[in-house]
Image: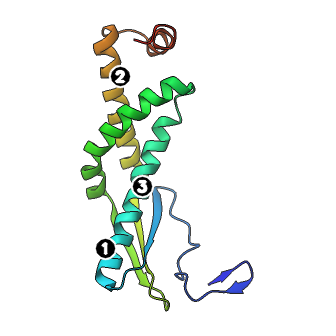
Amino acid sequence: MYIHGQQNNNIPPWFNELPPDDEIWRIGDAYLVNNRHSMNLAEIKARAHIISQIHIRIISRANDDEFKNLVNSLINLITIQASFEIINDTRILRQWVSPDGVSWCLIAIKKSDVRKYTSIIANIFDEYFDSIFGSGMDVNYQYEHYIHYGH
């Protein structure tokens, strides 16, 4: 593997590969004395990156700091609950241990699954606002009401 024109044997040969159009890939790496535990940690970190990606997609929809904080709090709670399902939809594509002992793990999830979780989280968020403001209220109005009145 070449990084900035120099060979680096401690980077997986698949590090710069691109995922197919219908998938999201994330890489986790870890170094522990026990290789099995190191690989497990690399796998956990890669899955955490995917969960973080879903979180970022949702939070990026909010455009006001106070509203973002509210959304972020709700998303944290919902994402924790959904994480177990998200983890079940991810799969390990590759694992590799570098000569310097670092374990690497490449995880994939289908974009359709990411959209599914984003939609589930958005629906829960809408239900939350409906419980505060009443069902059928326009989300933009709910947002404006929250910004102006705080509830």
In the picture of the structure, the residue carrying the numbered disc 3 is 50
Label 1: few (<14), some or many (≥20) within 10 Å?
some
Judge depth for marks 1 and 3 and give the one in front.
1
In the picture of the structure, the residue carrying the numbered disc 1 is 40
Residue 110 in the image: state x and y as whole percent.
40, 55
Residue 61 in the image: state x and y as whole percent.
52, 31
Residue lying farthest right? 5
Amino acid type for the residue under numbered disc 2: Asp
What secondary structure is marked by label 2?
helix
C-alpha separation, residue under disc 2 versus residue under disc 1: 36 Å
Relative to 135, residue 12 above or below: below
Camera-nearest residue between 132 and 93: 132
The earlier-in-sequence mark between 2 and 3 is 3
In the picture of the structure, the residue carrying the numbered disc 2 is 126
Camera-nearest residue between 30 and 107: 30
Relative to 103, residue 134 above or below: above
Residue lying farthest front? 33
C-alpha separation, residue under disc 1 versus residue under disc 3: 16 Å
What secondary structure is marked by label 1?
helix
**Badges 1 and 3: C-beta atoms under 8 Å apart?**
no
Which residue is depicted at the point 75% across and 82% down? 5
Quadrant in the picture for the C terminus:
top left
What secondary structure is marked by label 3?
helix
Which residue is depicted at the point 49% across and 24% down? 67
Residue 52 in the image: state x and y as whole percent.
43, 50
Amino acid type for the residue under numbered disc 3: Ile
Residue 116 falls in image quadrant:
top left
